[in-house]
């Protein structure tokens, strides 16, 4: 592992649609002495930022060039079509690419889906960004197929979306330069992979807690509580006393079998 000297801060890039809140919270709990700086970046510029040293690691969209970048796939997103709320597609819970064949489907230049051929009819021009395409959908120009996180990111009250069953899916991964796998990068990999703070691969295990002393097992046995019989001893009841505690002399003090009445 290279990069033994730690940076004063850890820089984490993330592309639109990714929400790193959970991992940042865990980082702040485990490494409060190392500030984490978030660096927003477009999907197209994310790999250049990592290569140029603008971030130590980043949440990106696959595929990743494996020649100089490492990547850990995290999850696959649902693909949806963004539509006006009064569109006919809102009548169904899910559509297919074929259902969009007669629709104008916008294909922005920053599209994150790996289409062989986008569905529907192409627009006259390709929007520059996904946000531009969303505004065109709101204006009634066409529809837009995107990962669900981007539909949520650019949510508008006059728009909604539906899943597209057979569309390509976008996969999100954690990536970093192979030659810059520093200790801090390893720390963040452990957090993303769900390792506990005491994991065998973790560098910062929690301080060991002193073991509690075990109670002594030898010595006298526990005394029975007052008023309770011990073991299988005789039970006292309304029929008289038992054992040496009975009255001296008289019938109550006689021990053994009762006499046979004549």
Image (cartoon, helix red, strand yellow):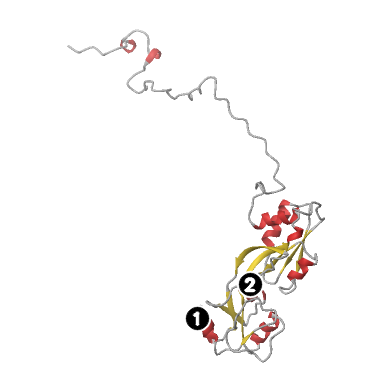
What residue does disc 2 label?
149
Q: Quadrant of residue 13?
A: bottom right
Mark 1 vs 2: CB contact within 8 A: no
**SS assignment at label 2:** helix
Report crowding for label 1: few under 14, some 14 to 19, many 20 or more residues within 10 A (C-alpha): few
Residue 91 location (% of width, % of height): 50, 83
Residue 261 location (% of width, % of height): 19, 13
Identity of the residue furthest to the bottom in this view: 124
Between 21 and 126, the residue placed more toward the observer is 126
**What residue appears at the point 48 percent right and 24 percent down from the top-left corner?**
224
Identity of the residue furthest to the top in this view: 249
Residue 132 location (% of width, % of height): 70, 83
Q: Quadrant of residue 178?
A: bottom right
In 3D space, how far apart are the residues under numbered discs 1 and 2 (Cα atoms)?
20 Å
Between 37 and 111, the residue placed more toward the observer is 111
N-terminal label among 1 and 2: 1
**What residue appears at the point 80 percent right and 57 percent down from the top-left corner?**
9
Q: Compared to 61, does 238 lie above or below?
A: above
**What residue appears at the point 68 percent right and 59 percent down from the top-left corner?**
23
Q: Quadrant of residue 70?
A: bottom right
Residue 220 location (% of width, % of height): 53, 19
Identity of the residue furthest to the left in this view: 262
């Amino acid at each position: 592992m290279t990069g033994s000297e730690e940076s004063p801060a850890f820089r984490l890039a993330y592309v639109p649609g990714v929400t790193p809140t959970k991992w940042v919270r865990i980082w702040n709990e485990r490494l409060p002495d190392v500030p984490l700086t978030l660096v927003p970046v477009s999907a197209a510029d994310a790999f250049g930022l990592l290569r140029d040293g603008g971030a130590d690691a980043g949440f990106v969209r696959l595929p990743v060039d494996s020649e100089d970048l490492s990547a850990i796939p995290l999850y696959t997103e649902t693909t949806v079509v963004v539509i006006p709320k009064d569109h006919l597609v809102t009548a169904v819970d899910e559509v297919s690419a074929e259902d969009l064949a007669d629709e104008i489907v916008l294909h922005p230049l920053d599209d994150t889906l790996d289409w062989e051929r986008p569905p529907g009819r192409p627009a006259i021009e390709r929007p520059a960004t996904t946000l531009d395409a969303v505004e065109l959908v709101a204006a009634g120009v066409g529809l837009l197929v995107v990962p669900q996180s981007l539909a949520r990111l650019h949510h508008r009250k006059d728009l909604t979306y539906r899943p597209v069953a057979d569309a390509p899916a976008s996969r999100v991964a954690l990536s970093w330069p192979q030659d810059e796998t520093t200790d801090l990068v390893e720390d963040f990999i452990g957090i993303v992979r769900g390792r506990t703070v005491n994991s065998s691969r973790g560098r910062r295990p929690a301080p060991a807690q002193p073991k509690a002393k075990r109670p002594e097992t030898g010595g006298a046995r526990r005394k029975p509580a007052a008023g309770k019989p011990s073991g299988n001893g005789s039970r006292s009841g309304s029929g008289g006393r038992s054992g040496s505690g009975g009255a001296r002399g008289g019938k109550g003090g006689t021990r053994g079998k009762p006499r046979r009445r004549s």
